Image: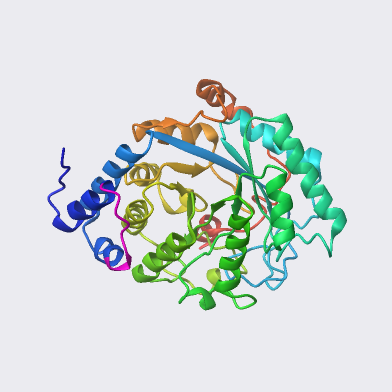
Amino acid sequence: MVYETGNRTVDEAVARVLDGDRLDRRDGLALIAQPVDALAAGADYVRTRLGDDTVDACSIVNAKAGNCAEDCGFCAQSVHFDTGIENYGFLGPEKILEAAQRAERDGAQRFGIVVAEKGVSKERRPEEWEEVLEAIRLVRDETDVEVDASLGILTEEEAAILADEGLNHYNHNIETSPRYFPEVVQTHTFEKRVETLRVAKDAGMDLCAGVILGMGETPTDRVDAAMALQDIGISSLPVNILNPVAGTPMAERGLPDITTEEVVKTIAVYRLLHPEARVRLTGGREVNLDTDGQVAALEAGADGILTGDYLTTEGQSAADDLEIVEQAGLEPNTEANDFDPEAVKERAAEETETETAAGTAQTKSELKSDD
């Protein structure tokens, strides 16, 4: 059976992907210029043929908030910017386990321990390093979710230890294209991020690495970011959408809002360039996309979400996420965590917050309401 959208560029790309071809930069640039309806339909068809019609949910905990020495222009946790977030040290293994257990009840298949700093160093901060390892062990042994982490730059020794402890995915987003990266971060290079991803992969961990849309990048930058990830080799591609926090350079630039069409087209292109990865709709989706827009992203090839709160901003409820998944005609993944979706919906009104910095920063929606 040959699937046809009526758009030659999209149809040829879909046929090649299903034949096992790897699309290149020229293909990506041609695709992102196509009408959104044809592009989304073609990408969704690839997902149905190569995927399993499920949406995989991950969740994270902000295990250590604020005081990061890096100057990433979107990040509320940088010591360089006055954003008013709550700062705290490492939460500790037991509190991280509590957050993981909540995520498991809410249907997450994987749980990420996130520390926003240049790197959790075994040599410079050995006590914190041991706490991280103990947290990984607790989540691994006391829950059914897959354990992931985002701990900044790694040495080869550190990566090997994390892999031996059973860490499943290592997250280290590249944020944007190599060309545009210096417009976002000055304290380290794009190549340094790629180096850490390669170290983690060489140690045996799968990679979760993605982007933030809406930081002033061009459509070409979005394609080039996907090509860089293709060269690295990833299994999970989170697509964040900028939710500018007051006090960060990205908020001060007054960037125009990214449109739903731009997001959906980028998701679709990423599906075609990464046909076997989980393309994950993550941070900032609630303030940039209405319900229909989030459904449209899932109908354009996305098959993963980040559910619950983010690092310094609040997310929507797990029950709302399940509704979006259902509206898109998909089902929640239960491979790692065989949870009860109806029970999640029933608990929605009784949810308690984990102890993170989520909600303490003034964000895009609040900035608009103050105008």
Q: As drawn, is 78 to the left or to the right of 309?
A: right
Depth order, front residue of 246/58: 58
Q: Position of residue 287 (x, y in %)?
A: 47, 52
Picture quarter with the N terminus = top left
142 vs 277: above or below: above
* Quadrant hosting residue 145: top right
176 or 102: nearer the eye? 176
Image x and y of residue 191, in percent: 56, 73
Q: Residue furthest right?
A: 127
Task: Check residue 196 for magenta coloring.
Answer: no
Q: Residue at x 83, y 63 (%)?
A: 123
Q: From which residue to which does the magenta span run?
A: 19-26
Height in image: 68 above or below 147?
below
- Residue located at (28% from left, 62% from top): 32
Q: State yes or no: residue 25 in magenta.
A: yes
Can you give x and y, in whole percent of width and height, for residue 368 in the image? 50, 60
Q: Is residue 213 visible?
A: no
